[in-house]
């Protein structure tokens, strides 16, 4: 199982970016997919979480600005980020709780980070 994150880049304050995280490989089911971010000198923080029951939750710092969605057919989640501020500058990571086979349990997988830089 692999997670491939993409879509990072540089943008001015007030701008938008859309991140993608695609899961591939042996996938029987996906329970949870999340976006985290880590700014220089800071701990990694949870940004948004999608659960298989359909709920999506956001950190207070991004509510109303970020939207997480999922394309079930592609096993891909997206993070639409609007009204970006310099405080959103970080490396963004995706994480997924995936059951690779019909038997066995769920495992956690991380994608590589994608850098988002917001200039003032």
Image (spheres, rainbow, N blue to C red):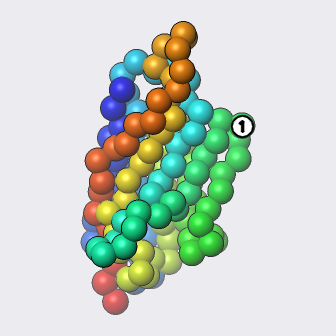
Question: Residue furthest toward the bottom?
Answer: 120
**Where in the figure is residue 39, as x and y percent of width and height?**
34, 72
Q: Which residue is depicted at the point 29% across and 74% down?
A: 40
Residue 101 visible at all: yes
Say which residue appears at 47% left-offset and 64% top-offset: 45
Q: Is residue 80 above or below residue 72?
A: below
**Between 45 and 62, the one nearer to me in the picture:** 45
Find residue 77 and report its horizontal and vertical position in percent.
Answer: 49, 44
Q: Quadrant of the N terminus?
A: top left
- Give the residue displayed 51% in from the left and 60% down from the top: 46
Q: Position of residue 61 (x, y in %)?
A: 57, 75
Q: Position of residue 98 (x, y in %)?
A: 50, 29
Relative placement, left or right, of 95 versus 61 is: left
Judging from the image, what secondary structure is the residue with disc 1 in? loop
Q: Quadrant of residue 115?
A: bottom left
Please indicate whether residue 111 sits to the left or right of residue 28 in the image. left
Q: Which residue is mark 1?
A: 53
Crowd band around label 1 with a 10 angstrom C-alpha radius: few (<14), some (14–19), many (20+)? few
Image height check: is 67 above or below 103? Answer: below
Q: How many marks?
A: 1
Q: Is residue 63 left or right of residue 95?
A: right
Q: Residue at x 54, y 11 (%)?
A: 102
Vertical placement of residue 105 versus 83, above or below: above
Quadrant of the snapshot with the C terminus? bottom left
In the image, is residue 51 above or below residue 115?
A: above
Res 75 visible: no
């Amino acid at each position: 199982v692999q997670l491939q994150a993409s879509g990072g880049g540089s943008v001015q304050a007030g701008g938008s970016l859309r991140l993608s995280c695609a899961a591939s490989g042996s996938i029987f089911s996906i329970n949870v997919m999340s976006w985290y971010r880590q700014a220089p000198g800071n701990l990694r923080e949870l940004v948004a979480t999608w659960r298989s029951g359909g709920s999506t939750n956001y950190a207070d710092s991004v509510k109303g600005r970020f939207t997480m969605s999922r394309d079930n057919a592609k096993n891909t989640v997206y993070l639409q980020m609007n009204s970006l501020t310099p405080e959103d500058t970080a490396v963004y990571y995706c994480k997924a709780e995936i059951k690779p086979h019909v038997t066995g349990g769920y495992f956690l997988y991380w994608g590589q980070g994608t850098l988002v830089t917001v200039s003032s």
